[in-house]
Image: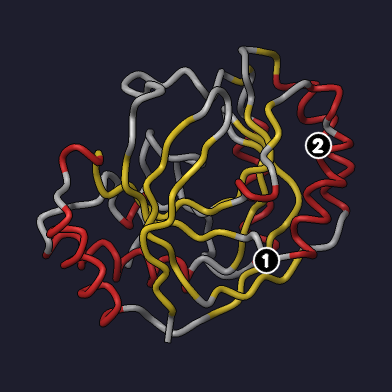
Amino acid sequence: MLLTASPTAFPAAPPPSTDDPHVIAAHDWAAFATVDRMSNHWDRPGWHDSTRAYYWMLTFADAAALTEQMRSCQQQLASLDFDLIGEDGLHLTLGRIGLANEVSEAQLHTLRNRASARLPDAFTISAIPMTASRGAIRYSVAPWTPLINLHSALSLTSDQCGLPLKKPTSVLRPHIGIAYCNRTLDSHKVRETIRPLRDLPAITVPIGQVELVELRREERAYRWRTLAVLPLR
């Protein structure tokens, strides 16, 4: 699957390599260097307290080394007064399936069954500290190729079930957020606060399953109800 440039993605252009961790991390950081002002992550038209939507997602509640490092990093970010992601909220979004009130139980059942038969082999990624986007502080991740393959399989299955993902695989930019920006502010201080964290070691994380969840927003945090856990091969 060839990644393409898109103004809706961040970074807008894909990295020169989708597997080299140094190239990916440098590309993410260079993209953030072009951001003059960060924006409020929660300023999202169409999202309300009552909104429920189905997503494909990777979660990391059992990734002890990752959550430990995340907590340490968040302590260093306290002066920014961002909305910190809890250990039970750490995730990597793969794709939005649709609004809960627009997708039937029968469609979800078919989607789960067909996706299970198409999933790729389990793999390992590295969470690389630390970078940011226009609205969040986040880990870079590498390699992208197994994530692209997983997304492509889920996207194809969703298409066949009449539930096309909101964004195609070609604009996938994998990352793991740790803190959401909750206002508009100059990005210079954010860059200077993050910079020392970039010397921390990457954390290896095994990926052995993907989750189908019903996502909601509670105040300034994401919460979800897991509908299915599908093991990779």
Along the line of sight, which residue is nearer the eye, 173 or 97? 97
Label 1 secondary element: loop
Q: In terms of image quadrants, where is residue 205?
A: bottom right
For the residues labelled 2 and 1, the Cα–Cα distance comes to 25 Å
Q: Nearer the viewer, mark 2 or mark 1?
A: 1
Earlier residue among tags 2 and 1: 1
Left or right side of 9 for 73: right
Residue receiving disc 2: 194
Q: Quadrant of residue 20?
A: bottom right
Q: Residue at x 89, y 36 (%)?
A: 76
Give the x, y percent position of residue 208. 52, 77
Pinpoint residue 114: horizontal percent, then vertical percent. 20, 74
Residue at point 55% right, 23% down? 219
Local SS, label 2: helix
Q: Amino acid at mark 1?
A: Asp
Label 2 crowd (10 A; few <14 / some 14-19 / many >=20): many
Pointer 1 residue: 62
Residue depicted at 62% across the width and 19% down the height: 182
Q: Amino acid at mark 2?
A: Ile
